[in-house]
Image (tube, rainbow, N blue to C red):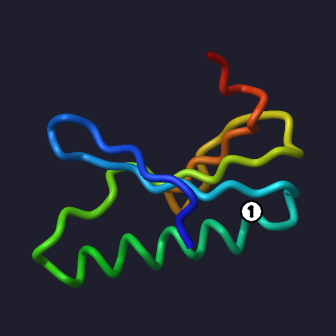
């Protein structure tokens, strides 16, 4: 489900899914939202602060209505 996790020194963390094609963004976003709801329902664990799908075949970044960020791999630079 999650391909990458980034944790900050203050304990906040983000969940990332990495997909090759834009046709997989919706399913990846649903998985991330489901994960966030699981952590919220648990009550004992901190939910992710950021949900993001990184995609290889898209041309612009945006925030979806469900709160999941969609970021093209080409926008990630060293």
| Pointer 1 residue | 25
Q: Could you tell me which residue is drawn at 10 percent across and 75 percent down? A: 44
**Position of 32 relative to 12 (above/below):** below
**Position of 12 relative to 32 (above/below):** above
Give the camera-side residue of 40 and 8: 8
Give the camera-side residue of 20 and 68: 20
In the visual, does 5 lie left or right of 60?
Answer: left
Farthest residue to the top: give it.
78
Farthest residue to the left: give it.
44
- The x and y percentages for residue 62 are 65, 41
**Position of 2 relative to 18 (above/below):** below
Give the camera-side residue of 20 and 38: 20
Q: Could you tell me which residue is drawn at 33 percent across and 81 percent down? A: 38
Q: Could you tell me which residue is drawn at 84 percent across and 54 percent down? A: 20
Q: Could you tell me which residue is drawn at 71 percent across and 26 percent down? A: 75
- The x and y percentages for residue 40 are 24, 75
- The x and y percentages for residue 72 are 75, 38
Quadrant containing the N terminus is bottom right
For label 1, count other residues whose C-alpha is less than 10 Å away and answer few (under 14), some (14-19) or many (20+).
Answer: many
In the visual, does 61 lie left or right of 46?
Answer: right
| Number of marks | 1
Quadrant containing the C terminus is top right
In the visual, does 70 lie left or right of 35?
Answer: right
- Dot 1 falls on a residue whose secondary structure is helix
């Amino acid at each position: 489900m999650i391909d990458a996790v980034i944790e900050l020194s203050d304990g906040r963390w983000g969940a990332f899914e990495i997909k090759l094609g834009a046709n997989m963004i919706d399913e990846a976003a649903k998985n991330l939202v489901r994960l966030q709801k699981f952590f919220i329902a648990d009550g004992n664990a901190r939910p992710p602060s950021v949900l993001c799908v990184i995609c290889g075949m898209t041309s612009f970044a945006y925030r979806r209505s469900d709160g999941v960020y969609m970021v093209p791999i080409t926008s990630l630079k060293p």
